[in-house]
Amino acid sequence: MNVDDVLQNPDEHLRFTAYLDELGHVADPDEIDLVSRVLTDPDQTMARSAVLRHLDRRAADLHSRSGYETWARAMTQATIDHPFLAQRLREWSLFRAITLKLPWQPDDLLASSNWLQLKTTAGTNTEALKILAAAGRTKRIRTTARTSRNHRDES
């Protein structure tokens, strides 16, 4: 089934499942076009949710590889009219920088979403853990960061 056929189905649950399947099997050269086409679905909440899952899956797979930056730039263009998706891509790029110990700004981490801050607390970047332990967005983030930091100190 292709995306044009999927768009004809009135059931958004079936479209969502079909989109995830299509996105999970798309060839790299066709990915931008497919993401753009999914985002034309009349049910924008569902379409963005399907694309978000795809972005998370792909970014998790690519974030430590050399092709990540090219992919992220292309996906940013495909999602430019969808602020939440563009923000998630920026946060994946920040997560990549923190994880790979590339240059990053503490203020960017502190301004990031709960999602990124919690994801970062599971990592090994001592500087990021220290920042989140002191000034994470929520009590849960601060506590998790302190626990992770203390566990690293004990190791």
Image (cartoon, rainbow, N blue to C red):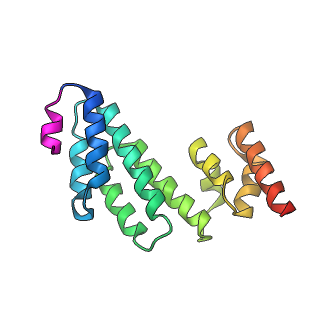
Q: In this picture, is 120 found above or below 142?
A: below
- Residue 121 shows up from this direction: yes
Query: Is residue 128 rendered to the left or right of residue 116?
Result: right
Q: Give how far across and how far down residue 64 sits, in percent.
A: 50, 68
Residue 5 shown in magenta: yes
Query: Is residue 132 rendered to the left or right of residue 45?
Result: right
**Which residue of the protein is positioned furthest toward the bottom in this rendering?**
66
- Residue at screen point 45% across, 61% down: 61
- Residue at screen point 17% across, 29% down: 9
Residue 144 appears in which quarter of the rendering? Answer: top right
Camera-side residue of 109 and 30: 30
Q: Give how far across and how far down residue 111 sits, in percent.
A: 60, 48
- Residue at screen point 34% across, 32% down: 45
Q: Which residues are magenta?
A: 1-9
Query: Is residue 92 rendered to the left or right of residue 21?
Result: right
Across the whole image, how many numbered discs are drawn on residues? 0
Q: Which quadrant holds the C terminus?
A: bottom right
Residue 94 appears in which quarter of the rendering? Answer: bottom right
Q: In this picture, is 115 found above or below 74?
A: above
Q: Give how far across and how far down residue 150 sits, in percent.
A: 84, 55
Residue 3 shown in magenta: yes
**Which residue of the protein is positioned furthest toward the top in this rendering?**
10
- Residue at screen point 39% across, 71% down: 67
- Residue 113 shows up from this direction: no
Residue 97 appears in which quarter of the rendering? Answer: bottom right
Q: In this picture, is 82 found above or below 60?
A: above
Q: Which quadrant holds the N terminus?
A: top left
Q: Give how far across and how far down residue 46 sits, in percent.
A: 33, 33
